[in-house]
Structure formats: structure tokens, C-alpha cells
Amino acid sequence: MTENHPNSGRKSTLYGGVATTTTAAGWRRRDDLRQSEQAARVRSWRQERWYSVKDRPLRAVVAGVGRAGVPAVVIVPGLGAVRYLSEAVEATGAWTQCVLLDVPGFGYGGPKTCEPTVQAVAATVAAWLVDHRPGPVVLAGHSTGGQAVLRVAAELPGQIRGLVLAGPTFAPQARRLAGLVRAWARTSRHEPGSGLWAALPDYRRGGLRRLIRYVRSGLADRPENLVGSVSCPILLARGEHDHFAAADWVDRLAATAPRGQAVTVPGAHAFPYSHPRRFAQLLAQAAQLD
């Protein structure tokens, strides 16, 4: 409802019971109210679920509902940080059911789901899919999570409709300490500062030793030796300022895959955090690949 503002030609809008004048500040406040209400509605149908995998607890964050003819999306986070993917999960849940797996278990206190290695995460995700999600899914992984889901796709080809590797790590030039530091320095200047704060609580729960072990397992992994054996469509996406997933490296992976496609999107390594809706669009694109 609108009403004339006293003594001026401006108008005021009643939104959510609060009158906001349509100055720049008023528009911002109205948008904030709208976004807050939308976020509250989304959170009301985002759920936390617990599973047992290999006699260990596995936590998942689930958004949205399944739809006929539309595959569910399963996401594996990078380095075990789950919170920074919240908005991407919500955006994906608008068109299908989206499941974010908390592996190796940094998103909660208590016993961890698995060891903090690419191999252990892959084995856990594969076991969860076999036990709890038999239908074909779009499987996505960010960063080291991409390394894990690549292994899952090679092991369970019949259960993967499409594979999305977002910021696949690690480009060969970043596998030694000096190269890793250079990649971090060139990438981090383009990352939003809030991204680290979003991931920090999970990193704290994981602990420095587990994080270092996870990084080392990723540095020792060789995705280029595996990608050629994955038969499902693979969408490889990198941020334009991502030097962990350098353009030439991603292009080589896509060329090696039987059904690979490489795309570059705005952002840096953490583009699923800084551009969550773009990431959700990539997931939707993968759901249509056949």
C-alpha cells in the first residue's frame, strides 16, 4: 500500500507493517526487509538430517523437495567447510532437493564422519549414495570436494547424472609450497573478506592438524589420471581469478574427460560463496546434460 508523504511529492510504502520513504535509504531498508523475509521462508524448509555411514554419523543440510524428472543435487564442500555454501544450497533448493554433505564432519562438534583426506571423503560419499540415495543425482564438489566427487563418479557411474567440479584443485603449478603460496596470494586479493569468516567456525572445529592433512592429501592427488575414466558429463567451472584452478589446467581436464566442458565464471576460487546463484545455475545446467 502506498500513501502520499506529507508536505512533499515523495511516497511512502507500507511493507511488512513498516512505513519506508522511497528515498535511497528507504529503498535499501525495504529491500532489506524483503530479503530478510525471503531468507526466513527459505530457512523454514532447510533441514538438518543425520545418517549413519560405516557406523559413523554423517550430518547433511537439505533444502528443497524432490520433483518428478529432476535429479537431486548432492554437494561436497571444499576442505570440510559447509557454512559458506549455505546460500548456494538455498538457491538450488528452489528447483530441486539439494543435499550438502558435512564431510569429513567439521560442521559440528563430536566424532567426525571420516578421516580428513580426499580418499576417505570419497569413500564416505560413495557409501552414503549407495545406502541412502540410489537414484541418479547431480554430484558436485568444490575445491578438494571436487577431487573427492571425481573418485565417486568413477566408482559409481550408474548413480551420477552429471558431475560438477567447481574450482577443481590443485593445478600442477600449485602442488609445491612456493606455487601454492603464489596461487593463494594471486587468488585471495579477489576473494570477499567475509568468505573466510563464513568458513572459520568449521575450520576451528576441524583443527589445524586435520586441515593440514586434508590439504596434503589434495596436493598428492592426481585428478588428471582419473578424469578420463569418468563416463558421465562433467562440467568444470572456475572463477576468472582462481589460480588454484588455473584456466589451462581446467581446460586440460575438460579435454581429457570423455564428456567434459569447461566454463569460466565471475569470481575467484570461492565463487560458490561470492556468486551462489551462478553456482546454482551451473548445477541446473548439469541436471540437463545427457
Image (cartoon, helix red, strand yellow):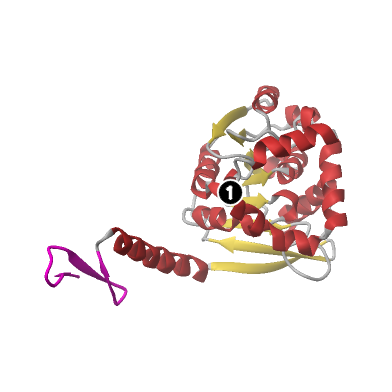
- Residue 282 % position (x, y): 53, 41
Q: Is residue 173 left or right of residue 101?
A: right
The picture quadrant where one finds residue 141 is top right
- Residue 160 % position (x, y): 66, 43
Inspect this view and state whether residue 54 appears. yes
Q: Is residue 171 left or right of residue 24?
A: right
Residue where numbered disc 1 is placed = 192
Q: Which residues are magenta?
A: 1-21
**Closer to the camera in the image, 128 or 214:** 214
Q: Residue furthest bottom?
A: 17
- Residue 101 % position (x, y): 69, 57
**Closer to the camera in the image, 111 or 6:** 6
| Three-letter code for the amino acid on which mark 1 is drawn | Pro
- Residue 261 % position (x, y): 59, 28
Image height check: is 22 above or below 186?
below
Image height check: is 280 above or below 257?
below
Q: Is residue 192 left or right of residue 33?
A: right
Q: Is residue 176 left or right of residue 77?
A: right
